[in-house]
Every structure is written in structure tokens, then in C-alpha cells.
Amino acid sequence: MRSVDVVIVGASLSAAAAAKRLTDAGLETVVLERKELPRHKICSGILSPRGHRFLLENFGPLPREALHEPTSCRGVTFHFPSMVSLSMDFFGGTTPHLHRKYSDYWAIKRSGAEIHDQTSFAGLEDRGDHVLVHARKKGEPIEYRARHVIGADGPSSLVTRAIYPDYPQQIPWFFVGQKFHAIIDCPLDEQYFHFWFHPGLGHYTWSHARDGKQIVGVGFKRGDNFAKKHANVVSYLSEKHGVRLETHTDDEGCAENFGPSLINRYVFGKGNVLVTGQAAGFLNMIGEGMSCALHSGAISGEAVVEARLRNRPVQETYRKMIASEVRRTTDQWNPLKIAFDKPHEADFPAALMALGWKDRAKVLRDMWRFVVLYKEFNWGRQIFREMLQRRMLGGYSAQRWL
């Protein structure tokens, strides 16, 4: 049995950020990854300016192999059923277009942690003064004894399921899939990430250029038909935007937990086990989860270091420290913040006000119709309650967190 200070599950960007904080503090840290590294990661790859700054400050300039073509993204374009489109540049300029297979591997190597790939997490036992982690290395059982464990293993987190077995049944799940098409003709500007507020297309619909192809992505309730949803979007892009594509050559998809950031229903762990990144429920409004994964991951590592230095319970420390990231992320979904503040890294209020009053009214009407799409999940009252608490208390209630 291997004894270490911290075991991190998942070789993700949030894991790399946590590991960097831990190893910088001199803590022996092991990262478990079930796949052989470098491994494929389902992701569009568009990083926010905040995430880019974090990588530069903590890991240095990205190597060329860690980027797709085009290598950068200028901003986002919102499209509406009324055919009004709003293009918004990111504050601070262009950001990198990450190739997650290589960017994640680059970051986790630079974190200084010991990496155990082809090692699957199988369970844990929190025994108070340590956590016993059960894993399998190339099919063979292996165990670790750690003071703390950090789950950084994505939306379908096995660490979360190990400590809260019923959690997956407490939130709605979505399927997010993307297909890759050779381009015949595509008027969509390749320097932007394109997003559609269109209830007829799906709960989350996007498109952008990558490595000579066009991604057409769609998110919808788990159980719906991916092929039909995707075909509907391709037909719409052709009819409304003049996008002509070859039949797709590749596709990929995964489960996503959209709700936690929207309704402040995060899961941060129990006892000596912390949960971070998308495993905790962090996701920005345009579906970019990398920046909040990096920052929440770093906070989880800092919380372990701080708790040990001050001999305080790690959960108490983590929940106090993570409140700032909760505010930043959930603000992006808060209607009051969207309307009267700048919670995003592109200026939506300014772009909206630049429209004539008729187009402005169309956009607001279209956004409302899109929000109604989520009515079946009973999020309306929860969003309203969180919105009022944010205004009255200056933050979001920790009582809703697991």
C-alpha cells in the first residue's frame, strides 16, 4: 500500500491546478487516471480569458501541440430565432483553442505531481485520520493511504458517487454531443464560438471551426435521440445561415450536469474527501468549464494546505474558500447580474444596447422563450430565490451545497 499526502482522481485541468498548489507546498501528491496518457478529452476547446490567464500564471505559455487550428478564439456570437446575431469580443483579446488531449497532459506534468495512469478509481473509505483509496492498475487491485482525496474526475464523477450515492438522481442530466463535418461553405466567422438561443434546436446548441472541419454540437435531455437532434441543427444551419457541410465523419458525446451552477446546487465533498471542477458542478454559461475548473481545482489544493497548516477541518476550510468561485460562476446564470452587471468575459449588455429597439425586443423575447425550455426542471423558483439571496446577502447560500 502506498502512503501519500493527497490522492487526486482524474488527470484533468482541475486536477493539475490542485496538484500544483499541493506540490508547491511540499505535499506528496499522486494523480490517478484510468486512461493511458495523453488521453482524448471530449471538449470544444474554447478557453475563456480567465482560464488563459490562470494557465499562463501557473504553468507558462502553452506549447503549439496543445492547440487546435485556428489556434485562438476572438469571442462569442449569440444567434436568435428572429435572426438577430450578437458578436462580442472577449475582454482582453483572443484566447487559445485548447487541444485537450495535449493541454491536459502538459498541465498535469508541469504540476509536479506523480502520475499513475491506467489506474481506475474503485472506491474509498474515509477513516477519519486518513482515506483508504481502492483502485485497479491495469486490472490489478491497488490501494493508497492518503490524508486527503480530491475528486477531479468530471461530471459523472465516481468520487461523488462514492460519498453521495444518490446524488446522480437528485439533478437532471443532459447529453452533449458534437459531430465533425468537412466544410463545403461556412459563412460563420471561424474566429468566434457560435451559440444558438433557440428552443427548437435543443437545450445547448453551438458550432465552430476546428482543424479544417466544422463542429456541430447539441445538448439535450438524456434519453433523446442524438442523430435526430443533430440532423435538425444541420438542416437549420443550412437553411438559415447558408452553412453547407459534408456528412459528418466523426462524433462524440458525454453526460453533463448543467444544473448545479445555475441553481447553486454544488457538491463539495464530505470529511477528508473534496470534490472540485465539473465534478462539483462548476460550468460557465456558454458551456465553458475549463476556467472554473482550474480556479476551483486550485482552491481545493489551497484548502488542503491551509487546513493542515491551521489544523482545521478541511471541509470547513474548503467551503469558506470556494464561496468566491461559486459567486463568480453562478453570477453568470443570474438574470439580474446578466442584465445590470458584467458577469461574463464579453459585454452582452453593451451588444444588446447597440441594437435598435425593435431588435432588442426580439432578442429579449427570444431569450425568454429559450429559458422556458427549462421549465420542466422546476428551476424557475430556484433561480429566483438565488437571485434574491445574491442581491440581499451578497452571495449564495452554502446550505444548498452537499
Image (cartoon, rainbow, N blue to C red):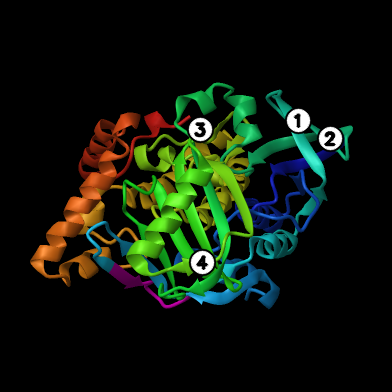
Q: Amino acid at mark 3?
A: Gly
Up-down relation of residue 107 to residue 392 (above or below): below
Q: Amino acid at mark 4?
A: Leu
Alpha carbons under labels 1 and 4: distance apart: 43 Å
Alpha carbons under labels 3 and 4: distance apart: 26 Å
Q: Amino acid at mark 1?
A: Ala
Up-down relation of residue 75 to residue 130 (above or below): below
Q: Amino acid at mark 2?
A: Arg
Q: Say whether disc 3 or disc 4 marks the residue closer to the N-terminus.
A: 3
Residue identified by numbered label 4:
245
Residue identified by numbered label 3:
223
Residue identified by numbered label 1:
122
Alpha carbons under labels 2 and 1: distance apart: 7 Å
Verify whether residue 120 appears in magenta. Answer: no
Q: Say whether disc 3 or disc 2 marks the residue closer to the N-terminus.
A: 2
**Pointer 2 with pointer 1, Cβ within 8 A:** yes
**Pointer 3 with pointer 2, Cβ within 8 A:** no
Verify whether residue 90 appears in magenta. Answer: yes
Alpha carbons under labels 3 and 2: distance apart: 31 Å
Residue span colored magenta: 86-95
Query: Where residue 382 sits: x, y (%)?
Result: 29, 32
Query: Where residue 231 sits: x, y (%)?
Result: 47, 51
